[in-house]
Amino acid sequence: MRLLLVEDDAVIAHELVLRWERNAWAVDVAGTLQAADAMLALRPVDLVVLDLGLPDGDGLHWLARLRRNNRSTPVLVLTARDRVADRVEGLRTGADDYLVKPFAVEELDARVEVLTRRAQRSREDFVQYGQLTWYGNEGRVDIAGQSLVLFPREFEVLGLLVRRAPRLVPKRALIDALAERNLEVSDSAAEVYVSRLRRKLAGSGLAIRTLRGFGYVLEAES
Ligand code: CA
């Protein structure tokens, strides 16, 4: 995991870098907005921790500019500006979280973990396996660039299989995952979805194998 800390207070920056490197997180530190731009251009990061009062400008303006061409990198604002109006403005400008100084480092760490976990999950919403591409956020599946027409439950089942492929998905896990999405499913219904999917995948180079008594595996045919 790589973080970019934009902070001109050398004491805070030093303390956080020491702490985060102990967590085995890689940290780039920028003391100015200009340095932050240069570092982001050099390599992408998993999270930006952003002070607002910086020597060469206001962190909020920088954030607004960042959001115009980078919607996905999570940003946590860390600032002494503690009014409700400041927090609201920070979040509306595109911050994913907002923590007021003075702060407890344990709380900052916990918030960093939440944001990076969330980002990780949304990356998992795009999966490629063999000729198949599964777009979780868009409810879409392509095979060799051709769209595959699926019903919602078939889509969820295929999503589960493709995210674990080529590993086994226990039948129970499949039923539980559908139940979590408020899609009620019986044991035999799960089999029905799998057999429908199997028909739709025919000729795609992908096959769903049943391991009787265990579950299902999505395999790329050789
Ligand atoms: Ca500052």
Image (cartoon, rainbow, N blue to C red):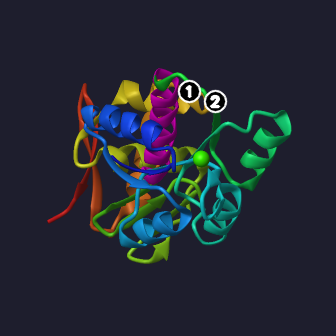
Q: Main secondary structure of the magenta part?
A: helix
**Label 1 crowd (10 A; few <14 / some 14-19 / many >=20):** few
**Label 2 crowd (10 A; few <14 / some 14-19 / many >=20):** few
Magenta stretch contains residue 115? yes
For this orientation, the residue located farthest to the right is 85
Under mark 2, the amino acid is Asn
Magenta stretch contains residue 174? no
Above or below, 106 relative to 1: above
Residue on which disc 2 sits = 182
Residue on which disc 1 sits = 179
Q: Nearer the viewer, residue 166 or 25?
A: 25
Quarter holding the C terminus is bottom left
Give how far across and how far down residue 212 sits, in percent.
23, 31
Above or below, 150 relative to 65: above
For residue 101, which numbered disc appears in the image? none
- Label 1, secondary structure: give it: helix
Residue 178 is left or right of residue 60, and the answer is left
Under mark 1, the amino acid is Ala
Give how far across and how far down residue 15 sits, in percent.
38, 33
Residue 21 is left or right of residue 138, and the answer is left
Above or below, 124 relative to 12: below
Residue range in magenta is 106-125
* Residue at 35% from the left image edge and 40% from the top image edge: 17
Residue 105 is left or right of residue 62, and the answer is left
